[in-house]
């Protein structure tokens, strides 16, 4: 994709989800642990099927503050 081409946030989100899914599938195929967010928890999935909670977040999702700028 060229740098000049614009992509919608919906398309960008779909690409990110597809890339994440492929990365998890590859990690499972190579039997290496991978880490994901499940709700408020950061969880590491091991190849033997065990899960380890790495950290618990205070909030699962947050909305960044809207920054407004004006051009004078």
Image (cartoon, rainbow, N blue to C red):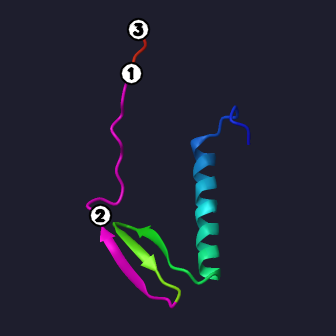
Are there few (<14), some (14-19), or many (20+) residues within 10 Å of tag 3? few
The verdict on residue 50 being magenta is yes
Mark number displayed over residue 36 = none
Q: Which residue is rendered at x = 53% and y = 86% of the image?
A: 47
Quarter occupied by the C terminus: top left
* Residue stretch in magenta: 48-68
Magenta stretch holds residue 38:
no
Q: Position of residue 13 (x, y in %)?
A: 57, 51
**Residue lying furthest bottom:** 48
**Relative to 42, is 60 above or below?**
above
Note whether 22 is above or below 8 in the view shown.
Answer: below
Question: Percent position (x, y) of residue 23?
Answer: 61, 68
In front of the other: 48 or 57? 48
The answer to whether residue 33 is above or below residue 14 is below
Res. 70 image quadrant: top left
Q: Position of residue 12 (x, y in %)?
A: 60, 47
Total number of numbered discs in the rendering = 3
Q: Earlier in the sequence, mark 1 or mark 2?
A: 2
Q: In whole angstroms, how far apart are the C-alphas of marks 3 and 1?
A: 10 Å
Q: What secondary structure characterizes most of the magenta part?
A: loop
Q: Is residue 24 left or right of residue 42?
A: right
Label 1: state its secondary structure. Answer: loop
Can you tell which quarter of the image residue 51 is in? Answer: bottom left
Mark 3 — residue?
72
Q: Where does residue 68 sit, x and y in percent of width and height?
A: 37, 25
Give the Cα distance between marks 1 and 2: 31 Å
Is there CB contact under 8 Å for labels 3 and 1?
A: no
Q: Secondary structure at mark 2?
A: loop
Horizontal arrangement in the rendering, residue 40 relative to residue 10 (left or right): left
Mark 1, residue position = 69
Task: Check disc 2 and report the residue beneath it.
Answer: 57
Q: Is residue 7 above or below residue 57?
A: above
């Amino acid at each position: 994709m060229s740098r000049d081409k614009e992509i919608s946030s919906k398309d960008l989100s779909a690409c990110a989800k597809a890339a994440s899914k492929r990365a998890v599938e590859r990690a499972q195929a190579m039997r290496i642990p991978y880490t994901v967010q499940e709700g408020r928890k950061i969880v590491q999935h091991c190849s033997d099927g065990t899960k380890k909670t790495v950290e618990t977040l205070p909030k699962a999702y947050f909305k960044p503050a809207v920054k407004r700028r004006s051009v004078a």
